[in-house]
Image: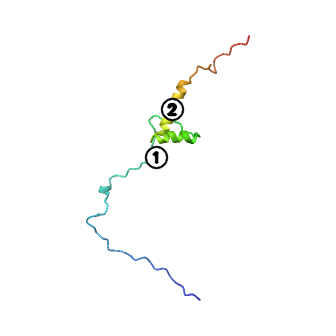
Amino acid sequence: MKPATTAKLPKKTSAKVNDPDNPAWTEDMLGAPVLKRGRGPQAAPTKVLTSVRLDADILAFFKAQGAGYQSRINAALRTAMAQNLTVRPSATAPKRAAA
């Protein structure tokens, strides 16, 4: 039969080490607590979170130009949209009678 063993308790360190080069933090040193979580409300939330599947070479082209590739893709899409604007009949306009 194996004898019962007990776990040893950790050593207690009652003597605090005072290091003049590394003093303990005080409330005055820390200042008032600041709680920040997330970005907070945007001033003008004009963008919409979406998922778009792009060809690998298209994405590589924009990423190769450096940071801000998503903004450049957005600008390229906006340019393409401006070039292809056409006047479309509105859905509320009365339809012409067929002759």
Amino acid type, label 2: Ala
Amino acid type, label 1: Gly
Note whether 77 is above or below 63 in the view shown.
Answer: above
Circle 2 crowding by C-alpha within 10 Å: few under 14, some 14–19, many from 20? few
Q: Earlier in the sequence, mark 2 or mark 1?
A: 1
In whole angstroms, how far apart are the C-alphas of marks 2 and 1? 30 Å
Residue 35 can be seen in this image: yes
Circle 1 crowding by C-alpha within 10 Å: few under 14, some 14–19, many from 20? few
* Residue appearing at x 52%, y 25% in the figure: 82
The disc placed on residue 25 is none
The x and y percentages for residue 42 are: 45, 38
The disc placed on residue 76 is 2
Asked if residue 29 lies left or right of residue 56, the reply is left
Q: Quadrant of the C terminus?
A: top right
* Residue appearing at x 53%, y 36% in the figure: 48
* Residue appearing at x 61%, y 20% in the figure: 88
In-front residue for pair 86/18: 86
Note whether 54 is above or below 95 in the view shown.
Answer: below
Question: Callout 2: helix, strand or loop?
Answer: helix
The x and y percentages for residue 32 are: 34, 52
Question: Callout 1: helix, strand or loop?
Answer: loop
Name the residue beneath numbered marker 1.
Answer: 38
